[in-house]
Image: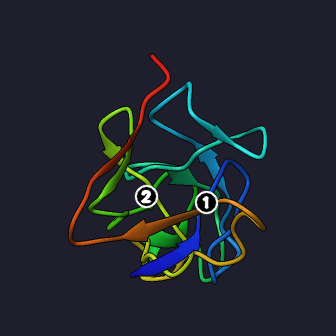
C-alpha cells in the first residue's frame, strides 16, 4: 500500500502553480478544500509559452483510484498535472492510499 499526502486549495505543483479552483465544495483536509481531479491552478514557468502552464489552462489529474471526494478522485503528492508537473508538498498529516482490497469514499453531503 502506498499512502501519500493529500493536496488542498493553495497547494503547489513542482513548477510553482497553486491550486485555486476545486470542482467540489464540501470535503476538507486541515481546514482547506480537498483537491480532486479537475482542480485548476495558477500560472507558473514557463508560461506564456507553452500556454498549458498558464492560469486555468492546467488541471490536476490521475488522483487516487480508491479514494474519492464527492465521487471525484482525490489528488495526492506525486500525482501529475496536465501541464506535466507533479503535485508537491501536500498536507503534513492527512494521507490517501491506493489499496487493492478496498475503496474509500469521502462524501460529506
Quarter of the image where one finds residue 91: bottom right
In the picture, the disc for residue 108 is none
First reached walking from the N terminus: tag 2 or tag 1: 1
Label 2: which secondary element: loop
Q: Quadrant of the C terminus?
A: top left
Left-right relation of 90 to 41: right
Q: Residue at x 56, y 33 (%)?
A: 27
Q: Is 83 situated above or below 32?
A: below
Q: Residue at x 66, y 72 (%)?
A: 44
Tell me the distance, in whole angstroms, between the alpha carbons under discs 2 and 1. Answer: 13 Å
Left-right relation of 4 to 32: left
Q: Is 60 situated above or below 27?
A: below
Label 1: which secondary element: loop
Quarter of the image where one finds residue 88: bottom right
Q: Determine which residue is flagged by label 1.
A: 7
How crowded is the residue under tag 1: few (<14 C-alpha within 10 Å), some, or many (20+)?
A: many
Q: Residue at x 78, y 38 (%)?
A: 31
Q: Position of residue 57 (x, y in %)?
A: 44, 57
Of residue 104 and residue 40, the one placed in the foreground of this image is: 104
Q: Nearer the viewer, mark 2 or mark 1?
A: 1
- Kindly indicate whether the residue at mark 1 contacts the one at mark 2 (C-beta within 8 angstroms): no
Q: Position of residue 33 (x, y in %)?
A: 65, 39
Which residue in the rendered view is the most extreme toward the left?
101
Q: Position of residue 41 (x, y in %)?
A: 58, 55
In the picture, the disc for residue 59 is 2
Of residue 105 and residue 12, the one placed in the foreground of this image is: 105
Amino acid at each position: 500500500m502506498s499512502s501519500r499526502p493529500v493536496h488542498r486549495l493553495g497547494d503547489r505543483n513542482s513548477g510553482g502553480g497553486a491550486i485555486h479552483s476545486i470542482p467540489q465544495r464540501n470535503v476538507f483536509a486541515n481546514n482547506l478544500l480537498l483537491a480532486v481531479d479537475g482542480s485548476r491552478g495558477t500560472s507558473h514557468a514557463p508560461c506564456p509559452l507553452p500556454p498549458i502552464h498558464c492560469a486555468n489552462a492546467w488541471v490536476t489529474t490521475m488522483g487516487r483510484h480508491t479514494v474519492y471526494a464527492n465521487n471525484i478522485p482525490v489528488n495526492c503528492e506525486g500525482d501529475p498535472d496536465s501541464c506535466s508537473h507533479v503535485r508537491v508538498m501536500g498536507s503534513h498529516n492527512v494521507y490517501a492510499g491506493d489499496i487493492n482490497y478496498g475503496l474509500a469514499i469521502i462524501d460529506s453531503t
